[in-house]
């Protein structure tokens, strides 16, 4: 599950879904496009695991003759394509070997352990581990008997893949340095560009702006009384009173004002052309500068030159006899700004190159009796790699394994697929076509699911409902959260009936929007449900490991998901309705958000030139003000909005109850609206 209000990485525009025109039209007989495609390979009738060959009794011969055999795996392909297939084949060999050649399905926990193996590098976007996970899931879907739902009619595993290209991070180029007093500090120990910096060269006088914070709610402003227009500001990391629990900023936990991007936007809004950040020597003296991440967020430009510098480089900017530690101490002890104009002028050069990667949704489907009906069952399989921007252990360089988030959801989804496959093989096929989607890029901002709804395997108008599973492996006190119960009139009764046998202590939220992939479907007016077992202390940390999964609870959640699918399939189509926003989502997910509340739903497909809205929450301040899906926010109460970070900064800088002016681009013209901000649930 992604953290709320995090920006997404850019998608390469694609004119159409590759292979869409070539895909055969739906058949009225059985709902299979062009008739059911023959799928070879040896499968257990329920689990899809490797079984003994009936003729030879040999798992090895079965593998040789299957689609995973040497002739299928090595038809003169480049090694870049062969390697992921080798990984998936090896995984299946392990299953076979572990069973001594005997049939036996891998359990849901086997799936969790495989996806959360450190060798998969935290399944971060741009890592080989994410590619290996995709190939493994394609192998599992094929073994279960699911038809390929990818965008190309190419050999396994590509036929299960829906590919898209994203920007993943930045790499440092040349020139990249700071020059002051005749000394040059190149990119390295004393100078590192920030990933959200613009490229270019800036020569400007320097102003020390304390912590670089403007926080009316804390009665604190480092920019009060100083002019930084067209200048370069030098600011400290974090915020006043760090480590001091009596500080007005609550020194034990940083507020959003401590975020470097927030400091950069604040500097820009005060007219600065650049920002230099230095570690506060009182608590972080001698800490090594970090290179810009090449594997995660923060690539969207902040609109100014930005970099971190060492204490040694910062000392060259200060007047003789003035120490950085003394300046910091004077601020901390009184919680009062101590900003000052410096005599020095600095030359800062930044060159960054954006890196890109191809990532994949993994899609399989089971034919139904009615080609005009479909259900989508989904879960995201990506995670944070070695931490990236969403990590809550940002100093850790360990792989974030994501056992609960969201190997558990993928395992539960495959459990539903196994039940559906068994039912079809037993002569009880579903009425609906069942589409199973393992989404990528969720942690980047619902990238994979947003791409899917624009390029669906089945037309969205045929989709009865979407069931999403995200973080379903930590069942405690028998409590299961179900979100989206207000998105269809029939959902409250349907969910309650399905729970009679399951016996969970259900906690529900009516809202169809939330920080996971079901939101992408709800914005397209598809009824949605999401299952979630709750937040925990290991969320977005390397400590989210398989040993902490409640295996029995995970099995129960998967069976409950199958019961929901059966209930949806057995009845007429549910009736979509626009759900009212409620505060239950914040409580369910482990706490509400920060600051003022507007109720807009950003569409992260647009990464610059304003913030595109995919919708607004019913009954929210945005709804009352007249904002609507399709609007692009370009100004917020005087603050220019270029991307999601600008938008978040603007909203955080205002208080609940405050009336703001919002300018949106709508239908080729700009429209100004007034909204009264609410209090975030």
Image (cartoon, grey):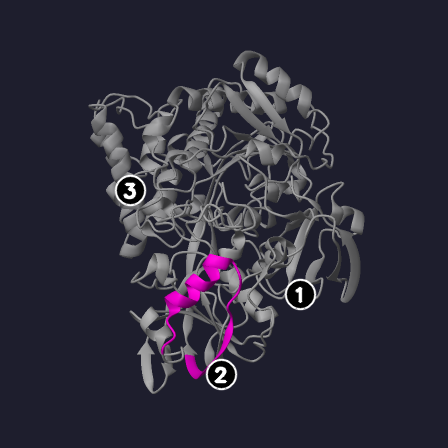
Disc 2 designates what residue? Answer: 204
Asked whether the viewer can see residue 127, the reply is yes
Q: Which label number is shown at residue 118?
A: 3
Mark 1 secondary-structure assignment: strand
Q: If you read the primary sequence from the N terminus, does the residue marked by circle 3 or circle 1 appear first?
A: 3
Total marks in image: 3
Q: Is residue 199 magenta?
A: no
**Secondary structure category for the residue under label 2:** strand
**In terms of secondary structure, where does tag 3 sit?**
helix
Mark closest to the chain's N terminus, 2 or 1 = 2
Would you say 282 lies left or right of 454 here?
A: left
At x 55% / y 60%, what residue is drawn? 14
Report how far apart the C-alphas of labels 3 and 1 lie in the structure. Answer: 43 Å
Residue 582 spot, x, y in % from top left: 68, 35
Observer-side mark, 3 or 2, equals 2
Residue 326 colored in magenta in the image:
yes
The C terminus: image quadrant: top right
The outermost residue toward the top is 501
Q: Label 1, on which residue?
A: 639
Magenta span covers which residues? 321-348
């Amino acid at each position: 599950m992604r953290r709320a209000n995090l920006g997404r990485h850019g998608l390469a525009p694609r004119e159409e879904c590759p292979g869409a025109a070539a895909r055969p039209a739906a058949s009225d007989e059985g709902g299979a496009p062009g008739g059911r495609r023959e799928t070879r390979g040896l499968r257990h009738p329920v689990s899809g695991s490797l079984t003994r060959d009936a003729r030879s009794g040999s798992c090895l011969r079965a593998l040789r003759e299957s689609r995973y055999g040497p002739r299928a795996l090595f038809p003169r392909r480049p090694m870049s394509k062969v390697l992921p297939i080798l990984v998936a084949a090896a995984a299946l060999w392990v299953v076979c070997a572990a069973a001594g050649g005997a049939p036996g399905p891998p359990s849901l926990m086997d799936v969790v352990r495989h996806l959360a193996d450190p060798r998969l590098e935290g399944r971060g976007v741009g890592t080989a581990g994410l590619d290996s996970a995709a190939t493994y899931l394609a192998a599992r879907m094929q073994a279960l008997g699911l038809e390929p739902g990818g965008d190309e009619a190419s050999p396994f595993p590509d036929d299960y893949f829906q590919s898209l290209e994203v920007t993943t991070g930045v790499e440092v180029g040349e020139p990249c340095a700071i020059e002051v007093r005749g000394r040059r500090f190149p990119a390295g120990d004393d100078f590192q560009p920030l990933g959200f910096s613009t490229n270019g060269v800036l020569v400007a006088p320097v102003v020390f702006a304390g912590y670089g914070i403007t926080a009316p709610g804390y009665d604190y402003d480092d920019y009060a009384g100083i002019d930084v227009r067209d200048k370069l500001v030098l600011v400290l990391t974090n915020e006043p009173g760090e480590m001091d629990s009596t500080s007005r900023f609550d020194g034990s936990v940083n507020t959003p004002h401590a975020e470097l991007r927030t400091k950069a936007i604040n500097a820009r809004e005060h007219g600065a052309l650049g920002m230099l950040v230095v570690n506060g020597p009182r608590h972080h003296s001698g800490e090594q500068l970090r290179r810009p991440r090449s594997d995660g967020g923060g690539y969207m430009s902040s609109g100014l030159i930005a970099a971190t510098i060492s204490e040694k480089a910062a000392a060259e900017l200060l007047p003789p006899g003035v120490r950085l530690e003394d300046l910091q101490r004077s601020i901390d002890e009184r919680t009062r700004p101590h900003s000052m104009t410096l005599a020095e002028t600095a030359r800062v050069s930044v060159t960054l190159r954006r890196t890109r990667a191809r990532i994949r949704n993994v899609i399989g489907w089971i034919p139904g009796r009615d080609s005009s009906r479909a259900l989508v069952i989904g879960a995201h399989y990506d995670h944070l790699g070695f931490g990236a921007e969403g990590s809550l252990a940002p100093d850790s360089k360990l792989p974030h394994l994501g056992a609960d988030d969201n190997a558990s959801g993928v395992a539960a989804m495959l459990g539903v697929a196994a039940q559906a496959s068994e039912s079809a093989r037993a002569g009880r096929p579903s009425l609906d076509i069942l589409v199973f989607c393992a989404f990528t890029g969720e942690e980047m901002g619902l990238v994979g699911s947003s791409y899917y709804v624009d390029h669906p395997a089945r037309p969205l108008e045929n989709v009865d409902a979407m069931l999403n599973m995200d973080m379903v492996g930590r069942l405690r006190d028998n409590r299961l959260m179900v979100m989206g119960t207000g998105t269809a009139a029939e959902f409250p009764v349907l969910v309650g009936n399905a729970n009679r046998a399951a016996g969970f202590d259900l906690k529900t939220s009516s809202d169809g929007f939330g920080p996971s992939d079901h939101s992408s479907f709800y914005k397209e007016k598809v009824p949605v449900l999401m299952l979630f077992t709750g937040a925990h202390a290991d969320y977005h940390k390397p400590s989210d490991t398989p040993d902490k999964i409640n295996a029995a609870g995970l099995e129960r959640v998967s069976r409950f998901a199958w019961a929901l699918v059966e209930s949806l399939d057995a009845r007429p189509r549910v009736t979509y309705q626009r759900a009212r926003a409620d505060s239950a989502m914040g409580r369910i997910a482990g706490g509400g958000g920060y600051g003022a509340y507007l109720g807009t739903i950003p569409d992260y497909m647009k990464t610059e030139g304003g913030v595109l809205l995919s919708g607004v929450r019913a009954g929210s301040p945005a709804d009352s003000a007249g904002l609507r899906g399709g609007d692009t926010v370009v100004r917020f109460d005087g603050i220019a909005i270029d991307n999601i970070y600008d938008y978040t900064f603007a909203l955080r800088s205002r208080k609940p109850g405050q009336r703001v002016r919002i300018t949106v681009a709508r239908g080729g013209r700009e429209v100004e609206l007034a909204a009264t901000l609410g209090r975030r649930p």
